[in-house]
Image (cartoon, grey):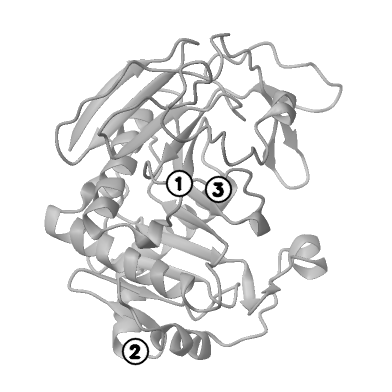
Amino acid sequence: MFKKTLTKPDGRTLWLYGSQDFQHAEAVSPSNEPVEANPHMRYHPLRQEWVLYASHRQNRTFMPPPEYNPLAPTRDPENPTELPQGSYDIAVFQNRFPSMALTSHNPPALDGILTEAANGTCEVVVFTQDANTLLSSLPVEHIELLLQVWADRTTELGNQENIQYVLPFENKGVEVGVTLHHPHGQIYAYPFIPPVQQKALDAARRYHQENNQNIGEALVQTELQEKGRLVHEGKHSISFIPPFARYPYETWVMPTVPAPYLSSLSAEARLDFAHTLKDTLYRLDHLFSGPMPYLMTIHQAPTDGQAHPEWPLRIEIYPALRAEKRLKFLAGTELGAGIFANDTLPEQTAEKLRQVQVNA
C-alpha cells in the first residue's frame, strides 16, 4: 500500500492511497476558509449515553447537481472539489462538517445536565474516483486496499491519547439519508467507547472468561456446522445472516480465526475477507431490481490501549429493505423499547441471498 499525506488550503488533512505508487496534483478544497466547528456533547441521564450537537452541519452539502460532485477529482480549478487530480485509488480527508472535532472547547454549561467538548474526529473515505459505480462492483484487490485503508486510519486515530473507539462505516442510498451518491463512507473516532460497542465488549468479555473462547469463534463454528444461514464460505472468512438478525437481510462478515482489528489479519486472510465482503455486497445489490440501500459498520476492538483477546472482529450490514421496494421501518417497538421485530426468518433470507448468481 502506498500513502501520501497532504494539507488542504483550509488546513484540513488529506490522505491518498494506492495499491501502486501514484502521481497527484496539489491538495484542493471547496473553500480556503478554515473550518470553524465547535461541537459538544450532552449526557442523557436515563439512557446513560452521550448525544452529539453540531449545529454547523445544517449547512453541509445536500444533493448537489451531477455537474458538481465534491467527491470527484477537481476538473475546473475555478470550482475546486475535495480531491485533486491523480492516479491514486482511495482518498480520506477530514470532514468539513464534523460531528466531533479535536479542537472543540468550552461546551455550554447547563443546569443539571453534564456537557463536554466533543473531542473526537470525523473523516470521509472516498472509495474510488468513479462516481458511477458501487462498492460491490469494485475489484477484490480494490476492496482489499480499502480494508488496509480502514486499518491504517484506525491505527493512526487510535494512537491518539483521547480516542477510545474508531468506527468506519458506509451509509448507502437515499433511504438511509445519503446526500452524496459518489461511493464513500465515513470514519468516526470517539473520545469514549460508544454504548453499542461497550455492551458488546462486556458480553464478549464475560463469554471469554466463562468459556475460555472468543465468542466470534463460537458464532463461526455454529454457522459452519448448521450451514442454513451461510451466505458465503471462504477459506478464512464467512458471511451469514445471524440467527438473531434484527433486519430481514442483516448480514455479518467474520474471519474464521478471531481477530480484534482489521490490522490483525494476515495478508492471505485479508484478501479472503475482501472476497467475502465483495460477494456479500454483490448479492445484496442484486437481490432486488436495484442496489440495496444499507448501513455497513466495521466493528473492531476499542483503541483504549488494552489488549482485547475477547473481541470478535466483524462487519455488520443492515439492509434498509425487507422486500422489493419495501422499507424496514424502525417504529414503536424498535425506537420506543429497543426491541426489534423481524417479519422474516434468517434461514429463509439467507437462502434467497444464496440463490443470487454472483458474476463479480
Question: Earlier along the polypeptide chain: callout 1 or callout 2?
Answer: 1
Q: Residue at x 30, y 42 (%)?
A: 151
Q: In this view of the protein, can residue 160 be seen by the observer?
A: no
Residue depicted at 51% across the width and 40% down the height:
193
Q: Quadrant of residue 325?
A: bottom right
Q: Quadrant of the N terminus?
A: top left
Residue 49 visible here: yes
> What residue does disc 1 label?
131
The picture places residue 224, in percent across and down from the top left corner, at 29, 84
Tell me how far mark 1 sits from mark 2, CA to CA.
37 Å
Quadrant, the C terminus: bottom left
Q: CA distance from mark 3 to mark 2?
A: 35 Å
Mark nearest the camera among 3 and 2 is: 3
Residue type highlighted by circle 1: Ala
Q: Position of residue 310 (x, y in %)?
A: 34, 56
Mark 1 secondary-structure assignment: loop
Q: Earlier in the sequence, mark 3 or mark 2?
A: 3
**Badge 2 element:** loop
Instruction: Sort mark 1 into few (<14), some (14-19) or many (20+) by Cα contacts within 10 Å.
Output: some
Query: Measured along the vertical axis of the image, is residue 106 above or below residue 254?
Result: above
Neighbor class of circle 2 (other Cα within 10 Å; few <14, some 14-19, many 20+) is some
Residue at the spot of label 2: 227
In the image: residue 82, left or right of residue 148: right
For marks 1 and 3, give the CA distance. 7 Å
Q: Residue 214's x, y, as percent?
A: 31, 64
Asked if 158 appears above or below 325 in the picture, the reply is above
Q: Give residue 21's quadrant in the image.
A: top left
* SS for callout 3: loop
Callouts 1 and 3 close, C-beta under 8 Å = yes
* Camera-side residue of 1 and 162: 1
Q: Amino acid at mark 2?
A: Lys
Q: Relative to residue 171, is residue 345 depicted above or below?
A: below
